[in-house]
Image (cartoon, grey):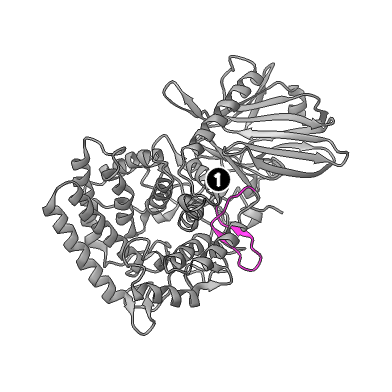
Amino acid sequence: MADLDLAVIGNCSYAALVDQQARIVWACLPHFDEDPVFCQLLHPTQAEAAEAGYWDIAVEDYSHSTQRYVADTAILTTTLHDRAGNELEIVDFAPRFRQYGRHFRPTALVRRLRPTVGTPRIRVRLRPLERYGAKVPATTHGSNHIRYVGATMTLRLTTDLPLSYIRREVAFELREPATLYLGPDESLTRSVGQLAQEFFERTRDYWREFARMLSIPFEWQEEVIRAAITLKLCSYEDTGAIIAAMTTSIPEARDSGRNWDYRYCWLRDSYFVVHALNRLGATETLERYLRYISNVAAGSPDGYLQPVYGIHLERQLQETMVPSLAGYRGMGPVRVGNSAFSQVQNDGYGSVILAVTQMFFDRRLAGPETDRAFDRLERVGEQAVARYNQPDASLWEYRGTEAVHTLSSVMCWAGCDRLAKIAARLGRPDRAAHWRAEADRLHTEICRRAWSDSLGRFTARWDGDGADASLFLLHELGFLRADDPRFESTVRELEKVLRVGDYVYRYTEDEFGSPSTAFIVCTFWYIDALAALGRRAEARALFERMLARRNHVGLLSEDIDPESGELWGNLPQTYSMVGLINSAMRLSTRWEDAF
């Protein structure tokens, strides 16, 4: 049975998911949002494709496996053991390193094989598909390569293994190291082994340098570094977009129908990602995202923003269902595209302003067009003021209900608050006064309409009574001080309604019914709220238990079953990895207090 004990390799253009037996079961090439060349994770249904959509290097008489990342990198090592004691080591990576003053990130998968004990018998099965699992590509071959000829893309496998073994999928003894290089339909200019060795070393060095430059906490260093690398892998470097997850249609819960395509750039999710990476001192992703946001804003002269865009700035993300894929464990539907692009989600305006704020205060980021950038940002702020009290689908993207959601209003307030601070920084007192007045006005109205004396907490919607885990962020966003009794009361009352064991639900009910899994980041938001209230020991204990819920290589998906602890939802989920980083940074012993 498939599960989400999957590892990720990638190079900030594409990513691949690898199971514990080193089978590549998901990879969209050449970019995150493209047709999946490997799609076995979602089970092709077409007769000729049902047993395809993966890249397997299998050991005969398989016994068990171990899997880990090369320390502080996105390079994966899997060791397969057979029952006779033979062992095969497989090193998988996507090349990424600096070359000629820019990042080299080809559409290539490198797999290095090495018999570490004995002489394992292996079988290589490379079975790509196209058109979302509907078609098997044609194959041709030369003296040292096999070509997989698709309608939109042709891939070439170059290897120093006998091609006939791969073409016929026969078992053979592996006595010495070997390399498989799957990439563009181009000839290599030197031996595949030499090329793979160089690419391995330079990719390893790139990721270790990335990790070395992070400002990590004293505690939970390995966990934070893994989360940071994962977030980096979710950035699409070409445009600066940041995807919410690398997969589509992994259900939020068993047979729930909550299957969505997350391979796009949500303005809200991206803010949380760049904010977390900024806390670690990794500003490059922010710089590229700022360029993406600038292009998004330039395409909307009046400041109106969709909640989600394509990674190439696409505005139309029409949602369709794909019959050629049965879905994760057969739990369809499989969706491509996301109708959220057409929703109204008013928190996005504040998300954009919050994401951009650092550039006005960080000397490393400020550029010559700072004043012009502020003028453009004010148009976003004007939309926030116009929309803070208007109905929307909320950050939870309700598909059947619109209301004035409190968190959306608070994010609009946050946008005005930050604009006031930016204007003061730029020496523009008139604009600072304007935005401070607007922020104060919004704050007063939100408190009047969203606070319930009878419930003793802020509510999910204005003049309502619903519970919403996003309200644990009221202190994090600066809307309430930690010592404000309304914040403590809100946390206390929300935990009574939304906490089940170690996990926090995002709300109690939506158009699909009552959720049966907990949205993972909500528990991290709760942990941060506990810490802000001084309940630090409780927060640390819960955080440690959440770390234990990561999969075997340290990744988290979107949701978790409170009863079984099983992960559900798209993987890896940026929200979840962000939550881990933020809680670790808040709870860790300070370096200066550690010795």
Q: Does 411 sit left or right of 171 as displayed?
A: left
Q: Residue furthest bottom?
A: 454
Residue 86 makes an appearance in the image: yes
Name the chief secondary structure element in magenta. Answer: loop
Q: Quarter of the image holding residue 438?
A: bottom left
> Is 159 part of what is drawn in magenta?
no
Bounds of the magenta segment:
553-570
Q: Please name the residue shown 56% across and 49% down the image.
A: 223
Above or below, comparing residue 248 to residue 549 in the picture? above
Q: Of 44 and 404, which appears nearest the observer?
A: 404
Disc 1 marks which residue? 226
Residue type at the position of mark 1 = Arg
Q: Quarter of the image holding residue 546?
A: bottom right
Q: Quarter of the image holding residue 563?
A: bottom right
- Please identify the quadrant where the N terminus is shown: bottom right
Q: Of 58 and 323, which appears nearest the observer?
A: 58
Q: Residue furthest top?
A: 189
**Element type where label 1 sits in the image:** helix
Residue 183 picture location, percent across and down: 58, 27
Q: Does 246 sit left or right of 341 as displayed?
A: right
Residue 110 picture location, percent across and down: 62, 29
Q: Of 382 and 330, which appears nearest the observer?
A: 382
> Is 564 part of what is drawn in magenta?
yes
